Image: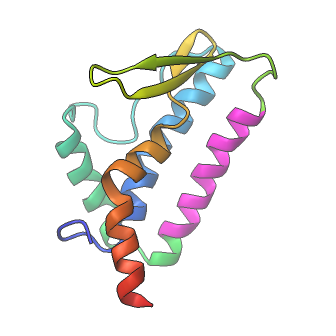
Amino acid sequence: MNGPWSMKDLVAHMTGWNRRLAAYMQAAQRGDPEPPPPWPAHLQAGDEINAWIFEAYHGRAAQAVLDEARQTIQQVIAVLDRLPAETPIEADHDAAGKAYYRVRIGGVRFPPGEFFEHFHDDHEANVRAWLAREG
C-alpha cells in the first residue's frame, strides 16, 4: 500500500484531512472564524500532520475508522448540499496548467475537489493495485 500504510491507514489519512476540511467549511458557512485543526497547532508540514494522523488512528479498529470516514464525508456533503444553486464555481490553473476549481463559502475559497484530486493523484494507483491483489 502506501509504504507502511495499510488500507485502514489510508482511509484514516483521508479522514483526518477531511475532518479539517469539513470543520473549516462549516465554520465559513456560519460566518465563524477558521477553527483550529484536529491535530496539534504546532504541526505545520504535511509530513508532520500525516505522521500525527497515522499515530492517532493506527490503533483503532477498522470499523471505527470506516464509521468516522462515513460521518466526515457526510459532513462535507451536507455543507455542499446547503450551498445556494447560484454559488459560482471558479476555475483556475496551477503553474503547470492543470485546472482546478474553487467555490466560495462565506467569502472563503475552497477547492471542492481537493479530496478526490488528492486521492486520485497520490493514492488511487495503490488502492487499485491492492484491489487487484485481493481479488
Whether the magenta-drawn stretch holds residue 71 is answered as yes
Residue 35 point in image, percent of width and height: 47, 26
Q: Which corner quadrant of the image does residue 46 belong to?
A: top left
**Residue 69 located left or right of residue 41:** right
Q: Is residue 56 above or below residue 97?
A: below
Nearer to us in this view, 91 or 72:
91
Whether the magenta-drawn stretch holds residue 40 is answered as no
- Per the picture, the main secondary structure of the magenta-coloured stretch is helix
**Residue 43 located left or right of residue 62:** left
Quadrant for the C terminus in the image:
bottom left
Residue under the point 39% across and 45% down: 118
Nearer to us in this view, 43 or 82:
82
Farthest residue toward the front? Answer: 97
Nearer to us in this view, 61 or 45:
45
Farthest residue toward the right? Answer: 85
Residue 127 point in image, percent of width and height: 38, 69
Nearer to us in this view, 11 or 64:
11
Give the magenta-colored segment's residue range: 65-81
Farthest residue toward the top? Answer: 107
Residue 57 point in image, percent of width and height: 35, 63
